[in-house]
Image (tube, rainbow, N blue to C red):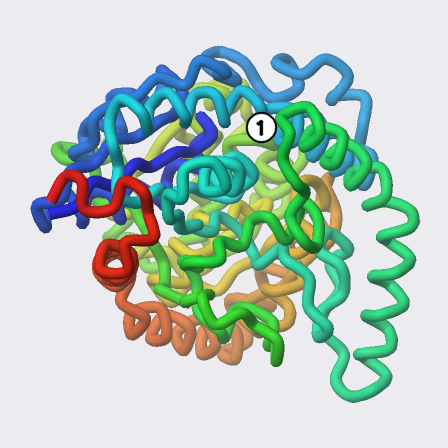
């Protein structure tokens, strides 16, 4: 059996796609350790992992990103994107490297498994120790391609020579403008820890040279003729239903009601209810639907503070694994995990978002045909109403969502991902390329 060291930033969207994979590896008899923030200790231990503390911990307990990083709240759009790259990701790498070196020396793993926020540190660790590593993706593919526009612009692909020309021009332009500052920060950080920058820069560093597990399917991701061979689509990596999860008191009433169910969520990062929750409640107040609004856990709005019309129920939390099979349309600000939770159940969607990587996900929802994408951070009720009517009334959206549901099921999910990680371990142990390979067999 092998030892796998997982490492992730202490945030729901970074940890959630990795948990089912760790749980599957543990069930197969492997030893798992996990380095992350202390607020996630119970969750990683429940997956069978030994908790390893992250001393450079961006502690989000009781705090939002805006509260943890002064100045972030004053940014928006591309300015916020640059801020997050510099402060939330690049600036954290030296501390991550130090933490990983300590845990590798103490625990002796055979393979390191990280999400993209830790890929820069994983690259450095491999250079210093030879430890093989794999990436588990947490959002759309970010690394450059001749067949796609630069990540972050939210532009769908264009076919043919004209499309490739557009991509070359935009990539060159972005490299000289937006990414120039990001690349400067990235290279300066690399200099502080005496390591060479990854070829292709920060976004390319997310691509492990060994294995990149992408928790989606090609039918949701733009086609790339230059897709690296180590990128493997493994389908959705979704959490299991919590044991003993309590269903809301209105559950049976919802099931008996013949009106379509529309689920609206605000997410766990962009949690201002005025951006999506309130406009959706207003938009659907007079519609022949049942609305279930979920405010987003600890950082979300208090349900009692939201004006709920007669056809709506507002909760802080509802177990998605139990609810999603009964949902007819999903309204969201575009979190990657939530999108794939809906797609795994064949649910079409309305997506509205303009911060973080949301423009890219809005564009992919449009491109794949699974729903209506709205590139706005503060949605207008009239436009939301029209979008929900389209998604419920036009069968093509549900047909495409069900087609992707079948693709996701066929991809294998956490079991397929665990098998590929086992193959990586066996290959590297046989080759003897990892300095620690086989040490714990």
Front-most of residues 38 and 389: 38
User: Would residue 44 be found to the left or right of residue 9 on screen?
Assistant: left
Q: Is residue 253 visible?
A: no
The image quarter containing residue 277 is top right
Determine whether 380 is above or below 6 in the image: below
Where in the figure is residue 112, as x and y percent of width and height?
35, 42
Where in the figure is residue 300, as x and y percent of width and height?
51, 24
Determine whether 357 is above or below 109 in the image: below
Mark 1: which secondary structure?
helix
Residue name at image x 52 percent, y 18 percent: 58
Q: How many marks?
A: 1
Front-most of residues 131 and 331: 131
Residue name at image x 53 percent, y 20 percent: 95
Where in the figure is residue 92, as x and y percent of width and height?
59, 24
Residue name at image x 56 percent, y 44 percent: 285
- Provide the residue designation for mark 1: 93
């Amino acid at each position: 059996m092998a030892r796998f060291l997982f490492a992730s930033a202490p945030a729901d969207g970074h940890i959630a796609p990795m948990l089912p994979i760790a749980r599957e590896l543990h069930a197969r008899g492997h030893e798992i350790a996990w380095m992350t923030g202390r607020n996630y200790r119970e969750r990683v231990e429940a997956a069978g992992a030994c908790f390893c503390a992250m001393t450079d911990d961006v502690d989000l307990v009781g705090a939002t990103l805006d509260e943890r990083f002064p100045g972030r709240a004053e940014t928006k759009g591309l300015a916020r994107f640059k801020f997050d790259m510099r402060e939330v990701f690049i600036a954290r790498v030296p501390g991550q490297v130090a933490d990983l070196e300590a845990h590798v020396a103490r625990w002796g793993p055979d393979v390191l498994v990280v999400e993209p926020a830790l890929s820069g540190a994983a690259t450095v660790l491999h250079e210093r120790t030879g430890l093989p590593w794999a990436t588990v993706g947490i959002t759309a593919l970010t690394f450059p391609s001749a067949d796609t526009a630069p990540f972050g612009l939210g532009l769908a692909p264009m076919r043919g020579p004209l499309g490739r020309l557009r991509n070359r021009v935009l990539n060159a332009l972005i490299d000289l403008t937006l990414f120039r500052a990001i690349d400067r920060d990235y290279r300066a950080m690399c200099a502080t820890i005496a390591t060479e920058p990854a070829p292709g820069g920060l976004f390319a560093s997310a691509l492990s040279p060994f294995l990149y597990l992408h928790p989606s399917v090609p039918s949701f991701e733009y086609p790339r003729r230059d897709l690296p061979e180590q990128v493997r689509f493994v389908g959705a990596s979704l959490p299991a239903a919590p044991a003993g999860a309590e269903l809301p008191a209105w559950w049976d009433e919802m099931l008996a009601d013949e009106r379509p169910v529309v689920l609206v969520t605000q997410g766990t990062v962009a949690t201002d209810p005025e951006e999506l929750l309130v406009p959706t409640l207003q938009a659907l107040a007079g519609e022949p639907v049942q609305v279930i609004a979920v405010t987003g856990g600890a950082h979300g709005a208090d349900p009692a503070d939201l004006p709920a019309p007669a056809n709506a129920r507002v909760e802080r939390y509802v177990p998605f694994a139990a609810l999603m099979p009964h949902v007819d349309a999903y309204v969201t600000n575009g979190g990657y995990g939530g999108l794939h939770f809906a797609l795994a159940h064949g649910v079409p969607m309305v997506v509205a978002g303009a911060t973080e990587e949301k423009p890219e996900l809005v564009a992919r929802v449009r491109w794949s045909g699974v729903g209506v994408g709205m590139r706005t951070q503060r949605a207008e009720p009239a436009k939301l109403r029209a979008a929900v009517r389209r998604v419920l009334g036009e069968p093509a959206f549900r047909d495409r969502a069900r087609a992707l549901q079948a693709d996701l099921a066929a991809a294998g999910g956490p079991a397929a991902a665990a098998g590929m990680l086992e193959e990586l371990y066996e290959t590297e142990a046989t080759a003897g390329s990892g300095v620690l390979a086989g040490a714990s067999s």
